[in-house]
Image (cartoon, rainbow, N blue to C red):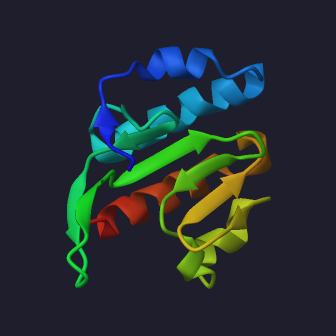
Amino acid sequence: KTKVNEASVDEFLSKVADEQKRKDCFEIIKIMKQVTKKEPKMWGPAIIGFGSYHYKYESGREGDMPQLAFSPRKQNLTLYIGVGDDSDNPLLKKLGKYKTSKACLYIKRLADVDRNVLHELIAGSFEKAP
């Protein structure tokens, strides 16, 4: 299970080998801090999260998750901002180069997207977050 921990976000990001990806991560942190007014925390070994909420499914399963999160994966910067179900979102049409899944936005590098649009998407996701 992915749980919040006391590991250092800066130490984790210092291990990102690609210099541009590392710089992009710090820029994403800046945007997410502006939106959430919260400090980043490590969730598990590789996810950087902002804020948290408690969920409980009808099955009885429950836990805690970050309200916003991202991870510098090998292939992409993965933003957990819940946009996958929202493919008709007009902001996505203006974003640039990206891919989505059910809850994630995948971008190769920040240079591929419009940062103002990304900021709006992140803010919209945070407003909807529990």
Q: In which quarter of the view is residue 64 placed? A: bottom left
Tell me: 104 left or right of 39.
right
Relative depth, front residue between 25 and 95: 25
Relative depth, front residue between 84 and 75: 75
Residue drawn at the location 75% of the way across and 41% of the way down: 109
Q: In which quarter of the view is residue 88 placed? A: bottom right
Residue drawn at the location 38% of the way across and 50% of the way down: 1
Tell me: 44 left or right of 13.
left
Q: How many marks?
A: 0
Q: In which quarter of the view is residue 42 placed? A: top left
Tell me: 74 left or right of 55.
right
33 in relation to 87, above or below: above
Measured from the top left, where is residue 119 in percent x and y?
51, 51
Measured from the top left, where is residue 45 in percent x and y?
48, 33
Relative depth, front residue between 73 and 35: 73
Tell me: 94 left or right of 104.
right
Residue drawn at the location 79% of the way across and 48% of the way down: 112
Assign the C terminus to one quadrant of the image: bottom left
Residue drawn at the location 47% of the way across and 56% of the way down: 122
Measured from the top left, where is residue 86 in percent x and y?
55, 80
7 in relation to 31, above or below: above
125 in relation to 3, above or below: below
Relative depth, front residue between 17 and 98: 17
Measured from the top left, where is residue 115 in percent x and y?
62, 47
